Image (cartoon, rainbow, N blue to C red):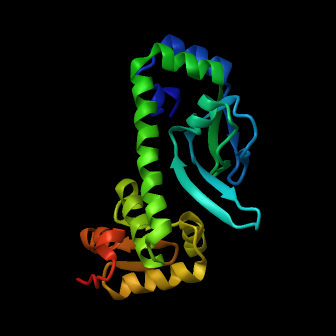
């Protein structure tokens, strides 16, 4: 995979891709490498050609929230480069990955010159706003089981019915901002209802439509969803 495989750059002509590649040499990084730190100036766009990255944030009390996982090929933290407000998260290599750092000026010029790239970014940002609104509702009104079900349904959209959970239940707890004990209880509840099967390091969706209903805070309130 190379720059042409990154969705943001899929419609960029070869000559421009070659210039971008020359100005942002690729390098291999090991799993666990910190690629950007929350709050530091986002003067370059992080482009991941192989492997993948994880976005995390930590509270003052030391609790970690896993904001998302992004498999290659991808370009991440676009909003931080656009608004100049510093990286929105700490970005860590999930696997051994090949990455490039595209200068902010090149990224902005690309959006000015390539309508398809501009639409791609606007669509992603709009989707993220919608997801954040949904997350706020879940965090404000939903119990642990509902929040766990909602996360599994969203993950299944890109990963299929068997969802490998990096970090196991502790990693899932970081992803939804709850404790590992709460997530363990939630998974046991969903398994008892016949909606999922829990495996070492993974969760298998057995009834996706019913799970989606359980992950809806309005529908799940006061309900007893079973197969």
Occupied quadrant, residue 37: top right
- Asked whether residue 57 appears in the rendered view, the answer is yes
Quadrant of the rendering where the C terminus is positioned: bottom left
- Residue sitting at the far bottom: 192
Give the left or right position of residue 208, taking residue 164 as reference: left
- Residue at x-position 40% and y-position 35%: 123
Q: Nearer the viewer, residue 31 or 45?
A: 45
Direction from residue 38 to residue 118 in the image, left or right: left
**Total residue callouts:** 0
Residue 164 shows in the view: no
Residue at x-position 40% and y-position 27%: 119
* Residue nearest the observer in this picture, 212 or 159: 212
- Residue 162 picture location, percent across and down: 38, 67
The answer to which quarter of the image holds residue 196 is: bottom left
Left or right, residue 34 beside residue 175: right
Q: Position of residue 38 (x, y in %)?
A: 71, 46
On screen, residue 90 above or below 189: above
Residue 157: image quadrant is bottom left
User: Where's residue 201, x and y in %?
Assistant: 52, 73
Please say if 188 is above or below 206: below
Instruction: Report the residue that reaches farthest toward the top.
Output: 15
Q: Residue at x 29, y 85 (%)?
A: 224
Tell which residue pokes out farthest to the front in this image.
140
> Toward the viewer: 34 or 119?
119
């Amino acid at each position: 995979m190379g720059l042409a495989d990154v969705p943001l750059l899929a419609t960029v002509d070869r000559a421009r891709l070659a210039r971008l590649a020359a100005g942002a040499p690729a390098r291999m990084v090991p799993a666990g490498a910190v690629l950007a730190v929350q709050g530091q100036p986002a003067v370059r766009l992080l482009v991941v050609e192989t492997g993948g990255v994880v976005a995390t944030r930590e509270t003052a009390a030391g609790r970690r929230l896993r904001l998302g996982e992004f498999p290659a090929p991808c370009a991440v933290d676009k909003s931080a480069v656009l608004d100049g407000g510093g990286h929105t998260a700490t970005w860590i290599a999930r696997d051994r990955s090949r990455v490039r750092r595209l200068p902010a000026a090149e990224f902005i010029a690309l959006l000015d010159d390539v309508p398809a790239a501009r639409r791609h970014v606007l669509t992603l940002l709009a989707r993220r706003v919608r997801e954040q609104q949904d997350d706020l509702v879940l965090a404000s009104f939903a119990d642990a089981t509902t929040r766990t079900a909602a996360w599994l349904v969203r993950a299944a959209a890109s990963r299929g019915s068997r969802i490998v959970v990096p970090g196991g239940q502790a990693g899932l707890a970081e992803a939804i901002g709850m404790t590992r004990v709460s997530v363990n209880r939630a998974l046991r509840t969903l398994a008892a209802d016949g909606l999922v099967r829990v495996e070492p390091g993974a969760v298998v969706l057995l009834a996706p439509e019913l799970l989606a209903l359980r992950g809806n805070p309005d529908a799940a309130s006061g309900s007893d969803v079973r197969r």
